[in-house]
Image (cartoon, helix red, strand yellow):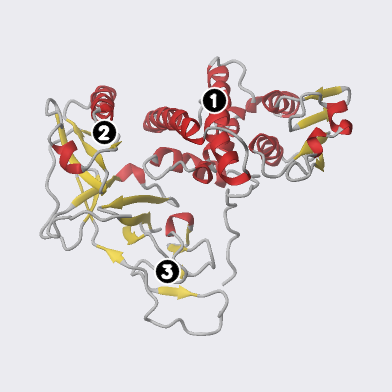
Amino acid sequence: MILYDAHHLARCYAVRLLLGYLGLTAEIRPLDVYPGHQHHSDEFLAINPLGTLPVLIDGTHVITDWQEIMAHIALNHAPDWAPTHDSALIGWLGIARDLGASAGLARMIDTFGEAGDAVAARTQANALLDEVERRVWFAENAGQLWLIPGAQPSIADIANFVFIAPCEDGGLSLRDRPALRRWCDRMRFHPGFVAMSGVFLPMAKPAR
Amino acid sequence: MARVMLDPRNWYAIAADHDVPHGHIYRTTLGGHELAVWRGSDDALHVWQNRCPHRGVRFSLGEVVDGELRCQYHAWRFAASGACTFIPAQPDRKVPGSIRATVWPMAQGSGMIWTGIDPVGSPPMLPDGAVIRAIPIAKPAAVVTQALPTDGLALMLQPLDEASAMVRGIALDGDLARADRVLTALRRRLERAA
């Protein structure tokens, strides 16, 4: 597998995080998105005319949608991570897209100078974060640790995590969203976790 | 963060017991004071100022390791007493006793974790029921307190800062979903009002 990647983009991080959890490797081809705009180069647009990242090439498959990439990898290597038997998967992936267009956009505006209306983005993000907080609190109360009932997280958790975990970089707050902070901890401590700018790895066991 | 007056003799509920599982550092504020709450390996709970005395980084970004809290920034470690026990950059030197986290009073009762400035006696006893999901409201505590519903709910306020308050409490009938609908409706009503 070849993954066209940019480290700071949440949608790319989602794919790297899934690969980490599953213990898989891909050949990572990093693009200089900012300030280099390599994703607007003729060479990259020949691969993905939309100019978006990430892109996965797996044999004859060229996949340009980050959620489809996750589903492709999970269905081929660890189907439990793509719980397609549960219609809630569609809803959670949809919420993740909405979070990307709100919390994710606010982060891109505040930290990478992307154009957009940060105030409107935060308003939408706060409504979504409140709702995810409510759902996760009641799920915890019922003994359920992940967004889709199961023994391990799924691509639904990953898709939402990549926008929720770094949301404070976009002027949002997890302070009064304790269930989201606990769920973020569960994601961070799950074996195979990898980090991104603003999302910490669990520290190594200290030698003292 | 602007501070609001707290009654220094009061106990304030700042978390539910279920908010602080092992290994997690819970983060909140009380009257503008940033707090971190964590659970030691002996199950004891600790309420600290959310600030490492070294470089001021929030403890809630750190980790609980072997019954101690470790700061994310330089991995200084602090025991349950608040005393710094280990500085990785100076592994062979004794840590000066003056390096301490600021420890707040802590009490448990009625399924909640309580703290305060200089609280007197024990926290209030709440009626039996289920601990509800706490709801933050972006209005000052003085405004929220006048609007609290009373039917079937025993409620109290945690002033977060000058502009917002957290509503906590007990659902007497144990119906957490109903309590949630009542309080989120209250939140919508208050936050829409000018």
Quarter in which the N terminus of chain B is drawn: bottom left
Secondary structure of the residue carrying tag 1 is helix
Three-letter amino acid code at disc 3?
Answer: Phe
- Quickly name the residue at label 3: B78
Residue A67 found in image quarter? top right
How many other residues sit within 10 Å of disc 3, few (<14), some (14-19) or many (≥20)? Answer: many
Nearer-the-camera pick, A117 or A176: A117
The chain containing the residue under callout 2 comes to B
| Distance CA(mark 1)–CA(mark 2) | 28 Å
Residue A42 drawn above or below residue B78:
above
In the rendering, at what x and y percent does residue A19 appear?
A: 72, 38
Q: Are marks 1 and 2 on the same chain?
A: no
Residue A103's x, y, as percent? 52, 34
* Label 2 and label 3 in one chain: yes
Question: In 3D space, how far apart are the residues under numbered discs 3 and 1 (Cα atoms)?
Answer: 40 Å
Horizontal placement of A16 versus A168: left or right?
right
Circles 1 and 2, Cβ within 8 Å, touching? The answer is no
Q: Mark 1 lies on which chain?
A: A
The amino acid marked with disc number 2 is Ile
Q: How crowded is mark 2: few (under 14 residues within 10 Å), some or many (20 or more)?
A: many
The span from disc 2 to disc 3 (Cα, nearest Å) is: 32 Å
Label disc, if present, on residue A6 of the rendered structure: none
Query: Can you identify the residue that label 1 sits on?
Result: A98
Q: Name the residue under label 2.
A: B132
Question: Viewer-nearest of labels 3 and 1?
Answer: 1
